[in-house]
Image (tube, rainbow, N blue to C red):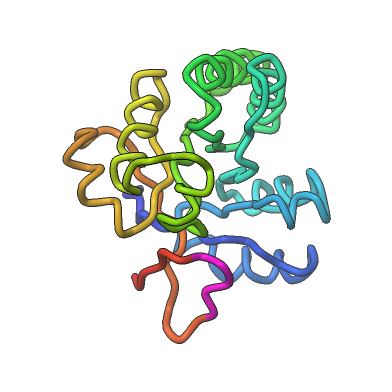
Amino acid sequence: MKEKGLIFALDADSLNQALEWVERLWKSVDGFKVGAQFFTRVGLAAVKLIQEAQSKVFLDLKFHDIPFTVEEAAYEAARMGVWMFNVHASGGTEMMKAALRGAERGAKEIGQDRPKLIAVTVLTSLAEKDLLELGLNESMDRHTVRLAKLALDAGLDGVVASPREAAFLRKELGENFLIVCPGIRLEPARHDDQKWVSGP
């Protein structure tokens, strides 16, 4: 079946609400994103709910820690049977390589293919002034490209980047590197604290 290029953010208030959304949308999207808020609220039940509906899970927990800890977290994510998960590229090359090792180990243990592993470049809530506050004296675009290339060189499958950055990242990274864009919303919609959003 041809992929649709759509992942629905399952930012639900309860398992019942999540189940309603999954049952309504699973044929129309490639998978469902489970973020930190919903996962912290209901735990592994969020993953199982999606998998029981024969759909795929993007575990959006953005691991960022020392390499050993991230490797073990990636191992556990892979053992859940998720389709894709992410880490922060700013954790560095060794951390990203450790995540790959953990994912490969976990997938092998359950007899499945390794989940896709993608890296967060710059959070969509950040602006140029925030980079300066963090001591990063380069433009948002340059910083994003630098982190994305680190992820590519580390062997990851793709990156998370804002819709604004997708076109120039595609030129820099080639056609086979995944670019997952959050903040794609129907208008009118509240943007929360995301500064870089777009329509479908």
Image-quadrant location for residue 128: bottom left
For the C terminus, the image quarter is bottom left
Q: Residue at x 58, y 72 (%)?
A: 192
Image check: 142 left or right of 105? Answer: left
Residue 85 is situated, as x and y percent measured from the top left of the image, at 56, 37
Image check: 36 left or right of 128? Answer: right
Q: Nearer the viewer, residue 107 or 172?
A: 172
Q: Residue at x 45, y 56 (%)?
A: 129
Question: Does the segment drawn in magenta span residue 192?
Answer: yes
Q: Is residue 91 above or below residue 28?
A: above
Q: Nearer the viewer, residue 96 or 128?
A: 128
Image-quadrant location for residue 10: bottom right
Count of marks, rendered view = 0
Image-quadrant location for residue 14: bottom right
Q: Is residue 22 above or below residue 167?
A: below
Residue 110 is situated, as x and y percent measured from the top left of the image, at 66, 20
Residue 49 is situated, as x and y percent measured from the top left of the image, at 72, 53
Can residue 117 be seen from the camera position used here? Answer: yes
Magenta-colored span: 190-194
Q: Is residue 61 above or below residue 124?
A: above
Q: Residue at x 36, y 34 (%)?
A: 148
Q: Nearer the viewer, residue 117 or 79?
A: 117
